[in-house]
Image (cartoon, helix red, strand yellow):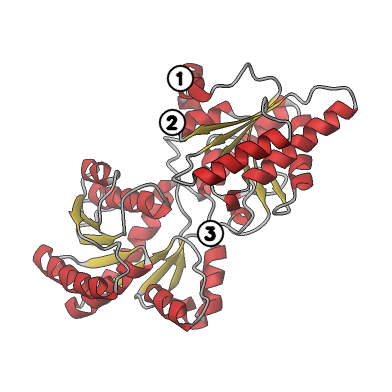
Amino acid sequence: MSRFESTILQVVPRLDAGGAERTCLEIASAVARAGGRAIVASAGGRLAPEIENAGGEVVVAPVDSKNPATIIANGFWLEKLIRREGVDLIHARSRAPAWSALQAARRAHIPIVTTYHGAYSAAGPIKRFYNSSMLRADRVIANSHFTAERIVGVAPSLAARLKVIPRGVDIDLFNPEKVSHDRVNQATQGWGRGEEAGLKLLLPARLTPWKGHEIAIEAVARLRQAAQATGQDCGLTLVFCGGAQGKNDYERRLRARIDECGVRDMVYLVGDCADMPAAYAWADVVLAPSTRPEAFGRVAVEAGAMARPVIASNHGGARETVIDGETGYLVAPGDADALAGAVRRIGAMSADARETMGEIARARAASVYSCAAMCDATLGVYRELLAERA
């Protein structure tokens, strides 16, 4: 990475779990490593110490607020911060902070970048105006071609200022060669499962209805029914790895559905996992059966980096991150039979064939979706804008 000696201010609502927050950390680290100064304005969160450990600086302010008066006040506060710290470029990662950042950037005469970490709905003129803060930057970054198409559909004139930079994954962290059997056992020992037999499936996602947990339960139930009809044992374990995040009613609904389908001995809700590379290493196959399109789909890339085949819904960013028949399979969204069929197909493959599919997924993740590639491309956008302004 070539030297980069500018001061970059990123603005993100909070620094908790999520794609925007994790990407903010990765870019701050890249700026600091390249010799620049990385400042992050946020309402705070658990990733703040990691940003500071990576060489960045965190400034706490209520930039997560959607109150119009607070947004305006944040704009003046950001302008003062820009002038005091000699900020060269500001990068906003959400709609409300983008309004504040726009005010500050225009008054301080510095470039502004925004990143779409998801495709926003635009029901009605008020919502469209609120969303438009992301469209007004000097450069707009989309985290996938799917997201870019949605943006251009709303604002066709934006195409010249739009840059697609896929979300990156840490190829060194998500590396199957660095995850030992002992580490897998330690990460999964609290999952409360019996001795697994046959295919091990992992669905890593927070417990929310559109992530496809119920479809996965139905698919497993149908696989069991088909096996019992021929007098065979299904031989399958499915783990839901992800917290309820306050949606306890949905967790209860899932547990009730598991009981209704008669698969309590096959499906396990284990909550969050602190060691996701080890969780992926445990699995034979990773599921991403979302019922609505994901803007990018981090799970498919992380699983691919861990050399695991992925079965994902055939919409949204998954069409870019999963190559059907090569790195996994794409199935019709919301179709339990299609999901069961893809699981059956992978289960019928030899261990060598599954390993080959995983190796292809790993190679593609490393070449297309590495964190290093994302950081280089983003710093390239910064350099381009700063050169134009100079």
Residue 91 image position (x, y, % from top left)? 30, 65
Tell me what residue is drawn at x 55 percent, y 22 percent.
192
Q: Quadrant of the C terminus?
A: bottom left
Mark 2 and mark 1 in contact? Answer it, CB < 8 Å. yes
Query: Which residue is the site of mark 3?
Result: 295
Earlier in the chain: of badge 2 and badge 1, it is 1
Mark 3 and mark 2 in contact? Answer it, CB < 8 Å. no
The amino acid marked with disc number 2 is Asp
Earlier in the chain: of badge 1 and badge 3, it is 1
Distance between the Cα atoms at labels 3 and 2?
A: 24 Å
Q: Residues within 10 Å of mark 3 (few under 14, many from 20)?
A: many
Residue 128 image position (x, y, % from top left)? 46, 79
The amino acid marked with disc number 3 is Ala
Tell me what residue is drawn at x 31 percent, y 50 percent.
15
Q: Please, what secondary structure does the residue beneath circle 3 have?
A: loop
Query: Which residue is the site of mark 1?
Result: 186
The amino acid marked with disc number 1 is Gln
